[in-house]
Amino acid sequence: MFASQTYLQRTSIIPAPEVNVWYVLSRMFYTYACRSSYMSEESGRRNLRMPSDDELFAVVTEHNGGNHVQLRCEDGERRMGRIPGRMKYRVWIEEGDIVLVDPWDWQDEKGDIEWRYEDQDADQLRAEGHIDWLYLPQ
């Protein structure tokens, strides 16, 4: 008897459904890994996560150790970014990466990193003109 069986399946002759656990887990992983951006077949454009009202694009300029990095944001400010625990060991953030940062309301010179763009996603953002400020003089 399996824990996933219902009372009717345990007490009657209804066979338990056969579930391939590895298939279910692999589909869950694939969905999680690919949910960040889906590619449109006709245009070849990926649907990327864009900043909300209070989020900004930023580039990582220096890694300070632990979960802190220096950021250069699109509004021209330099901020200290904090890598939250949900990203700390799952997403590796290095110098030169494009990220979304949510500045703190009570300390504008600090902020939380909300998202890191892959290299191909950053290339698409450059091509669409969202991060043209990246190559301007500092």
Image: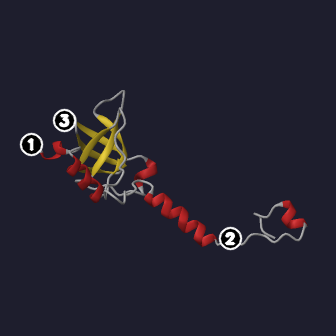
Residue at 79% over, 64% down: 5
Give the mark nearest the N terminus, 3 or 1: 3
Residue at 21% over, 35% down: 77
Say few, some or many: other residues with alpha carbon within 10 Å of mark 2 (under 14 / 14 to 19 / 20 or more): few
The residue that label 3 is drawn on is 76
From this viewpoint, is residue 135 visible? yes
**Foreground residue among 29 and 93:** 29
Circles 3 and 1 in contact, beta carbons < 8 Å: no
Query: Secondary structure under badge 3?
Result: loop
Query: Secondary structure under badge 2?
Result: loop
The residue that label 1 is drawn on is 137
Instruction: Specify the quadrant of the image occupied by residue 80.
Output: top left
Viewed as shown, does residue 42 lie left or right of 59? Answer: right
Image quadrant in which the C terminus is located: top left
The residue that label 2 is drawn on is 19
Residue at 72% over, 72% down: 18
Instruction: Specify the quadrant of the image occupied by residue 42.
Output: bottom left
Residue at mark 3 to residue at mark 1: CA–CA distance: 10 Å
Where residue 136 sits in the image (x, y, percent)?
11, 43
Where residue 36 sits in the image (x, y, percent)?
41, 53
Image quadrant in which the N terminus is located: bottom right
Circles 2 and 1 in contact, beta carbons < 8 Å: no
In the rendered structure, which amino acid carries the disc numbered 2?
Answer: Val
